[in-house]
Image (cartoon, rainbow, N blue to C red):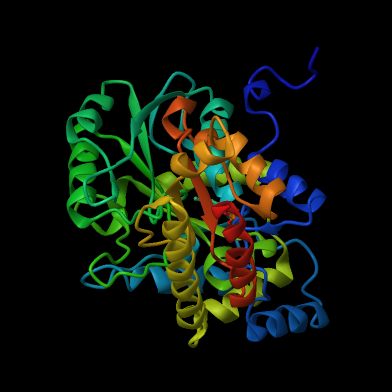
Amino acid sequence: MSSVSLRLQPFGTTIFAEMTALALQHNAVNLAQGFPDFDGPEPAKEAAKRAIDAGHSQYARMFGVPRLNAAVAGAFSRRFEPSFGVEPDAHVTITSGCTEALPSTFLGLINPGDEVILFEPFYDSYRACVALAGAVPRFVTLRPDGSGRFGFVESELRSAFGTRTRAILLNTPHNPTGKVFTRAELELIAALCRQHNTLAITDEVYEHLTYEPSLPHISLATLPGMWERTVTLSSLGKSFSLTGWKIGWAIAPANLTAGVRAAHQFLTFATATPLQHGAAAVIENPGPIVEDYKRLFRRNRDILAGVLGELGFRTFPSDGTYFIMADHTAVSRRLGAADDRAFCQKMIERCGVAAIPPSVFYENREHGRDFVRFAYCKKAETIDESVRRLRALAK
Ligand SMILES: Cc1ncc(COP(=O)(O)O)c(C=O)c1O
């Protein structure tokens, strides 16, 4: 009998740990877990080292090192038109990655029995956060349309809202589909939030990683009437290739920030002090680094998509994040793999490339069984090697 608590038993070990272990076992190229295989920017590392040398090694302020709160608030304020005064100390809470900002927000603002709307496929921790808060999930499925871009059916979203809806969780740019929600989609979500007086929790960890000029990242909080009802979550890791630093944040008006901090103070209390100093340095002065990463990711995406297409996969446009979803069914038939898990297992064994079976990101796993997710946030040579290996699937 499992000793894991009943509320967490359904979730098992995350698929990322499982696939990374399998990748190591088979010496595979790891296009499964979403982290770059290159180091983050020198100025951030230098600033963190200086902070250690300067004796910044005790607990930070509960809601963040002042310089980092100011840097995050400044960067976010500039998104609003006209520029808006996000207050560093009143509105920003620094957390241990977005991973901690999520349960802080759920535990601090959602009551047992409240309903929370999730788009599926969803980043796997959302489902666990809903369970930790004792809330009830409602799902709206994203499916590819004629152009191959993932979208939702308006009537399905409308009917997910009801009298018990406390919040909707929106992830844009979206993992695992690579979707960037359009302004029209966000306006509809905003209108429903206002109409039903619900909160919005947004996960924007890929905020800087968009590739199509016609599909820029838009923060839901910047839409009319949304600042007062939105908790915007993001982090340093994805955009700045510093995933191991686990520096994240929640931005919200003071009444919602009170909820986030009520939970954050008992989950981690504060986040690694010297790394907060390093994070502040790179957010204040990012230089060309994010554009350099994006140039690399765009190149990797295009090469990977091209080869996957040649091999018989149907790929879907990846307008943001650093993931690309593909339909593997034509290739699976050749390999005799029944679903996405079996396919990923065979791909590791057959050609030494690891990817993620996305059915774990769906409540109804059947909805995801035809897909596979590849991460392209890697050095050019890693992608070139994986492409060379993937060609073994043609035989
Ligand atoms: C959508 C999404 N949210 C949150 C996270 C976790 O962010 P962090 O590393 O800042 O905890 C990830 C990491 O893969 C993610 O893909």
Asked whether 306 or 175 is in front, the reply is 306
Q: Is residue 268 visible?
A: no
Q: Is residue 84 visible?
A: yes
Q: Position of residue 62 (x, y in %)?
A: 64, 56
Residue, x 21% and y 56% (percent of image)?
183
* Relative to 199, residue 298 above or below: below
Q: In the shown orientation, is residue 64 left or right of residue 136? A: right
8 left or right of 372 in image: right
Q: Residue at x 52, y 83 (%)?
A: 289
At 35% from the left and 48% from the top, the residue drawn is 230
Looking at the picture, how far across and down is residue 98, in whole percent?
A: 56, 53
State whether residue 365 is above or below residue 370. Answer: above
Work out whether 159 lies above or below 309.
Answer: above
- Count every numbered label the image shows and give the total: 0
**As drawn, which residue projects farthest toward the top?**
1
Q: Position of residue 179 (x, y in %)?
A: 35, 53
On the image, the x and y values in percent for residue 353 come to: 65, 55
Residue at 57% of width from left, 34% of height from top? 337
Quarter holding the N terminus is top right
Q: Where on the picture, by quarter, is residue 6?
A: top right
- Front in this rendered view, residue 338 or 124: 338
Taking the image as shown, residue 105 lies to the left or right of residue 182, namely right
Q: Quadrant of residue 74?
A: bottom left
